[in-house]
Image: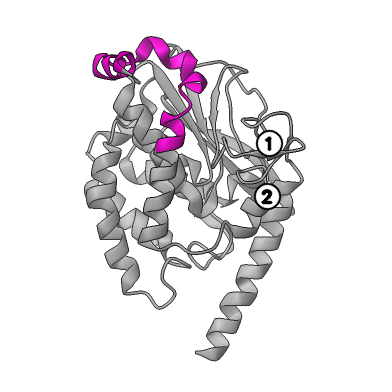
Amino acid sequence: MRHSKNLLFATFCLVFVSYSICAVENLEDEDCCSNPCSVPRSNLPLGFEESVSFSGCAFYYFYQLGVAAYLQENYDLSKVCFLGASAGTIAATFLACDISIKEVMDKWMPDIYTILKGKITGVYFNIFEAIRAVGLKRMPKDSFMKAKDKRRATFSLSRVTGCQIFNERKDIFNTNAELLNTGLASGHIPYIVDGRPFAYYNGGKYIDAGFTEYQPIFDGNTIKVTTYMWSPAIFGVRIWGSNSLFYFLSRYGSTSKKRNLRLFNDGYQDAKNHPEYWTRLERFLKRTAACKALAL
């Protein structure tokens, strides 16, 4: 047991350092909502008027789920498409497939925790196995069709060829399994998520999308979502959030239910407390949400 803990710690340190250095090298300090690696790629898919992108966030994806839950609850998102990189594909998948995030938190997550509870290392090395099992069990049968309909979901991936890493984008999915596996390939942090150095997908080898494209966008109008994006800034550098060193130094910490629920609530409240950030979606505001806003 002692040796296994040492091996786990050594593996964690190796992956943490390599991944964090890669992400930190791409930081931007323009404003509290700017993100690294935001390079316009292609045009907004036909039939959609707006796009929302969820950045890489490692085990902080519950914050993004909170933001996504706020958007799902208050806006008609039928004319909005979604992009995701790494763990950001989780929120992007649920929104693109019209899967209730409330149901995910109430029913999917308990199933995932049940699986992880029986694993010696808990989340580490096992999280993808749990997500895949529960996802295939609970996803509506037509989820992949909604995701690929008019390219409503676009995922960024990092493909490894020899000693080089190339960025790819994927927006066509033929089964729920392919949809899930694409998202998991995008979020494959070497060793940490399933004990393997690479995700083997469609004949290729992949690692976390954050190595090549941390925040995928279609154009300058894509609405970007990152973890703790509204945190305070000192001298132009945010204390917390995806372009903060403190964030990278803590992204692989506790993954308890209590901590994840706090992240979810933080994301929901932060999104709710910054209505000005969602101005581009204002015309899609649901009637009930609009009435609540007027009441305030």
**197 relative to 240, above or below:** below
Left or right: 102 with respect to 12? left
Marker disc for residue 215: none
* Range shown magenta: 269-295
Q: Name the amino acid, label 2.
A: Thr
Q: Which mark is residue 161?
A: 2
Q: Residue at 77% across / 46% down in the picture?
A: 25
Earlier along the polypeptide chain: callout 2 or callout 1? 1
Is residue 164 visible in the rendered image? The answer is no
Q: Is residue 192 left or right of residue 294?
A: right
Q: Which residue is pictured at 59% across the width and 61% down the height?
A: 190
Between label 2 and label 1, give the one nearer the viewer: 1
- The kind of secondary structure element at disc 2 is strand
| Residue sitting at x 55%, y 21% | 222
Above or below for 57 versus 133: above
Horizontal and vertical percent position of residue 129: 38, 61
Note whether 102 is above or below 58 in the view shown. Answer: above
10 Å crowding of disc 1: few (<14), some (14-19), many (20+): many
Q: Which disc is residue 36 wearing?
A: 1
Q: Give percent across and percent down for residue 114.
A: 27, 66
Q: Could you say which is closer to the camera, residue 121 or residue 198? A: 121
221 relative to 72, above or below? above
Residue 281 within the magenta-colored segment of the rendering: yes
